[in-house]
Amino acid sequence: MFLILKECSDDLAKYLESKAQIRDSVEIKDIFTRYTTDVIMSSAFGIRSNCIENSNSEHRTQGKNILKIKIIWYVLFTVMPKIMDFFSIPILDQRVSNFYLNMFEETVKYRKTHKLLRHDFMNILMQLMEKDHLDEDDNGKNNNITC
């Protein structure tokens, strides 16, 4: 996964260099939020979201929507999770859930069809779905989860 982080860091460096060349300012909080989204999407789902270049990316929009949980829902889910589950009240907006479920399903389907292997969390989940265990690496250790 180190290579995935390096790719995202290289993209960030190129973006900042291009802004520096034209002496344009950047909002640090915004650019690091976009970088973080790129890292999460790439390491978790194996998807290049390009949020650094495209600040209006759908991945970024849906990532923001995850964080828009109303405090009352959070409190209710924390204090009374069984009641919330009984009434089938979701903590996330259905559109956000559908976006990530569809992305997960499409990624799994694409990787199976094209026999694509990436060293990310999606690969770990696919191994667990198929085999109920993780493959060992060349040293006989199961360290796929670490960076």
Image: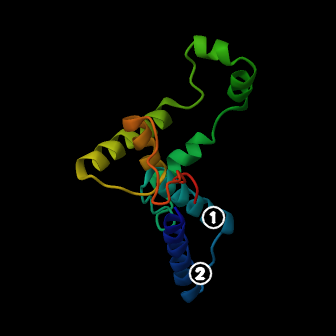
Q: Residue at x 63, y 42 (%)?
A: 67
Residue 41: mark in rendering: none
Q: Residue at x 55, y 16 (%)?
A: 88
Image quadrant of residue 143? Answer: bottom right
Q: Residue pushed farthest front?
A: 140
Query: Helix, strand, or loop for circle 2?
Result: loop
Here the colouring is rainbow
Residue 24: mark in rendering: 2
Q: Residue at x 35, y 46 (%)?
A: 107
Q: Residue pushed farthest left?
A: 113
Query: Helix, strand, or loop for circle 1?
Result: helix
The residue nearer to you, when weighing 3 against 46, is 3
Label 2 crowd (10 A; few <14 / some 14-19 / many >=20): few
Q: Which residue is denoted by mark 1 in the rendering? A: 32
Tell me where residue 84 appears, x and y as whole percent.
63, 16
Give the quarter of the figure containing the C terminus: bottom right
Q: Which circle's residue, 2 or 1, is located before the other in the chain? A: 2
Image quadrant of residue 72? Answer: top right
Tell me where residue 48 appears, x and y as whole percent.
42, 60
Q: Residue at x 72, y 17 (%)?
A: 80
Q: Amino acid at mark 2?
A: Asp
Up-down: is 14 above or below 50? below
In the picture, measured across the screen, residue 145 lies left or right of residue 111, that is: right
The residue nearer to you, when weighing 5 against 52, is 5
Tell me where residue 139 appears, x and y as whole percent.
50, 60
Label 1 crowd (10 A; few <14 / some 14-19 / many >=20): few
Tell me where residue 78 appears, x and y as whole percent.
73, 25
- From mark 2 to mark 1, how far is it between C-alphas? 16 Å
Up-down: is 17 above or below 52? below
